[in-house]
């Protein structure tokens, strides 16, 4: 047999071996998942999609709900390390304070994948981060408002997400970038609503009182749909019409915001897919079985939806997926 033929055969066997390894998938792998909590409809959808994805791939998912506390997440991650899991998924509640625990995971040789929120830590402490471009999300929301109000004066109130979380920081920045240079649009009030419906409502009630019962407010920009839904209720309670007296723009694209659009009470949302686990498990599969190192950032889409996009059908589709 010629040398070339031998090499070709060896290469073929190699390819066969690596595709056999690839075909193993994640069946039987143990993966810890430190979830933030259940503050929003989007978060609930992400939890359920992650569980579905794990089940479909035969992954033994160890789920830990941190109830919004970073200390609980750190404890859970340490627990996963002690159990010797094959990998860890973490949706980090805030951006800072992760170096120590992620160094422990690295020393234990356990790959960590970040889901939906970023952190300020050396990039070698995690395998990859599956998230949206959150600055872009804010920018898309801001550009929608700029295009909608044109030259008219517009006082905006902003409902921020959890203090210190990457989406709160980045969505604020992106929106401000979009309205910069449009002197007719001003953020007159900005406060955290912690990504929850109840706080969104409470904070909006305060904004309405402070702004002449809402007469001085042209739009509410909420960093997520749940806070927008809370704000919509507060606007109605104040005797105004959300969607027309006060424009409502937010981020997530969960079913409830599409119901609000159908009712004419919400004007725009930017989609954040709850399926972060699909790309995360694909990356993990390739890494564990074929040694393929994924890109450091896997960025999901940020699509704008308005009432022109058939909100009833968007609602039905998401409900059909179990969101
Ligand atoms: O990190 C993603 C954000 O967290 C979602 O936009 C929000 O709904 C959730 O609570």
Image (cartoon, helix red, strand yellow):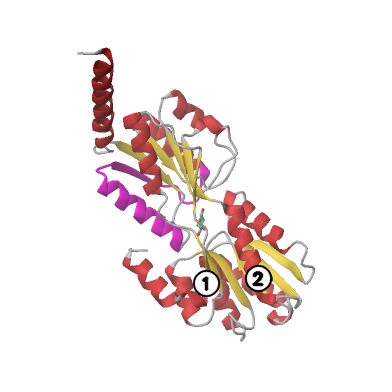
Is 288 rendered above or below residue 298?
above
Reply yes or no: does residue 18 show up in magenta: no
Number of other residues with Cα within 10 Å of mark 1, as a class: few under 14, some 14 to 19, many 20 or more: many
Q: Position of residue 215 (x, y in %)?
A: 71, 82
User: What mark, if any, has residue 145 been given in the picture?
Assistant: 2
In the current view of this chain or complex, which residue is farthest to the left? 1
> Disc 1 marks which residue?
229
Residue 45 visible from this viewpoint: yes
* Quadrant (top left/top right/bottom left/bottom right) for the N terminus: top left
Q: Which residues make up the magenta segment?
A: 41-70
Q: Position of residue 238 (x, y in %)?
A: 62, 83
Residue drawn at x 61%, y 65% as measured from the top left: 141
Residue drawn at x 65%, y 65% as measured from the top left: 142
Q: Position of residue 295 (x, y in %)?
A: 48, 37
Numbered disc 2: secondary structure: helix
Is 62 rendered above or below residue 220?
above
In the current view of this chain or complex, which residue is farthest to the front? 2
User: What mark, if any, has residue 28 been given in the picture?
Assistant: none
User: What separation in Å lies between label 1 and label 2 (alpha carbons)?
Assistant: 18 Å
Is 280 rendered above or below residue 6?
below
Viewer-proximal residue among 197 and 267: 267
């Amino acid at each position: 047999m010629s040398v070339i033929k031998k090499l070709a055969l060896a290469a073929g066997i190699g390819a066969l071996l690596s595709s056999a390894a690839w075909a193993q998938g994640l069946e039987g792998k143990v993966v810890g998942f430190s979830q933030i909590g259940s503050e929003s409809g989007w978060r609930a959808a992400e939890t359920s999609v992650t569980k579905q994805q794990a089940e479909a791939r035969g992954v033994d998912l160890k789920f830990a709900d941190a109830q919004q506390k970073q200390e609980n997440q750190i404890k859970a991650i340490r627990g996963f390390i002690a159990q010797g899991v094959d990998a860890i998924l973490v949706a980090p509640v805030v951006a800072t304070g992760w170096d120590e625990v992620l160094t422990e995971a690295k020393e234990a040789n356990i790959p960590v994948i970040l889901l939906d929120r970023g952190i300020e830590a050396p990039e070698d402490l995690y395998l990859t981060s599956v998230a949206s471009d959150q600055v872009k999300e804010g920018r898309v929301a801001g550009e929608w408002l700029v295009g909608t109000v044109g030259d008219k004066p517009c006082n905006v109130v902003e409902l921020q997400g959890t203090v210190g979380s990457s989406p709160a920081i980045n969505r604020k920045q992106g929106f401000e970038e979009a309205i910069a240079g449009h002197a007719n649009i001003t953020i007159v009030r900005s406060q955290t609503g912690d990504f929850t419906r109840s706080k969104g409502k409470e904070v909006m009630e305060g904004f309405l009182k402070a702004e002449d019962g809402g007469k001085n407010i042209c739009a509410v920009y909420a960093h997520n749909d749940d806070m927008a839904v809370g704000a919509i209720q507060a606007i109605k309670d104040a005797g105004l019409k959300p969607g027309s007296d006060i424009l409502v723009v937010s981020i997530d694209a969960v079913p409830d915001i599409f119901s609000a659009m159908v009712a004419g009470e919400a004007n725009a949302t930017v989609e954040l897919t709850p399926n972060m686990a699909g790309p995360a498990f694909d990356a993990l599969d390739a890494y564990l079985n074929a040694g393929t190192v994924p890109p450091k950032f896997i960025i999901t889409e940020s699509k704008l939806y308005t009432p022109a996009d058939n909100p009833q059908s968007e609602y039905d589709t998401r409900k059909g997926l179990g969101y």
